[in-house]
Image: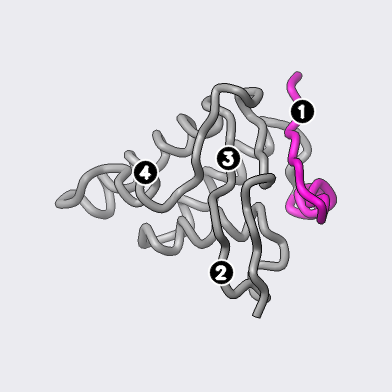
């Protein structure tokens, strides 16, 4: 089983454990729940950022984007497409994720999350 790896000075691995995310299956279930419990794309995107930035409420802005492996990116993209088909049929399905979501890299393991290129500006 591949572990979820997060590279960040604040080490949010503890944060993921608090969210009940200990492996890829837990992460998939957590992501599905985000989409199931949300009624708008903006809410989904905010919840995804809150998932990787435990101090989200203290952040003024983020320069750069989290970078994730292509397996995770594709998984979230598919959830976004299905979400939009149901909730926003008149828009480009998955467009909010493509425009405002995380970047992907084939240099990372498929389910890895990296925050190395993010500069967080606090309030």
Q: Earlier in the sequence, mark 4 or mark 3?
A: 3
Which residue is located at x 58 percent, y 29 percent? 69
Q: Is residue 31 magenta?
A: no
Q: Earlier in the sequence, mark 2 or mark 1?
A: 1
- Helix, strand or loop for disc 1: loop
Residue placed under numbered mark 4 in the picture: 98
Residue 37: image tag: none
| Pair 2/1: label in front | 2
Q: Position of residue 50 (x, y in %)?
A: 61, 60
> Which residue occupies the extreme top position in the image?
1
Residue 3: image tag: 1
- Helix, strand or loop for disc 3: strand
Q: Distance between the residues labelled 4 and 1?
A: 25 Å
Residue 61: image tag: 2
| Residue 50 relative to residue 39: left or right | right
Q: In which quarter of the image is residue 56?
A: bottom right
Q: In this view, does 106 lie above or below 9?
A: above
Image: magenta residue range: 1-19
């Amino acid at each position: 089983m591949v572990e979820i790896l997060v590279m960040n000075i604040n080490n949010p691995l503890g944060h993921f454990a608090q969210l009940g995310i200990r492996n890829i299956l837990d992460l998939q279930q957590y992501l599905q729940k985000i989409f199931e419990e949300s009624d708008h794309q903006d809410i989904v995107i905010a919840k995804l950022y809150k998932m990787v930035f435990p101090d989200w409420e203290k952040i003024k802005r983020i320069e750069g984007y989290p970078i994730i492996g292509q397996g995770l990116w594709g998984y979230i993209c598919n959830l976004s497409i299905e979400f939009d088909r149901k909730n926003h049929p008149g828009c480009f399905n998955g467009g909010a994720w493509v425009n405002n979501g995380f970047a992907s890299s084939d240099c990372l393991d498929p389910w890895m999350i990296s925050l190395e290129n993010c500069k967080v500006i606090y309030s």
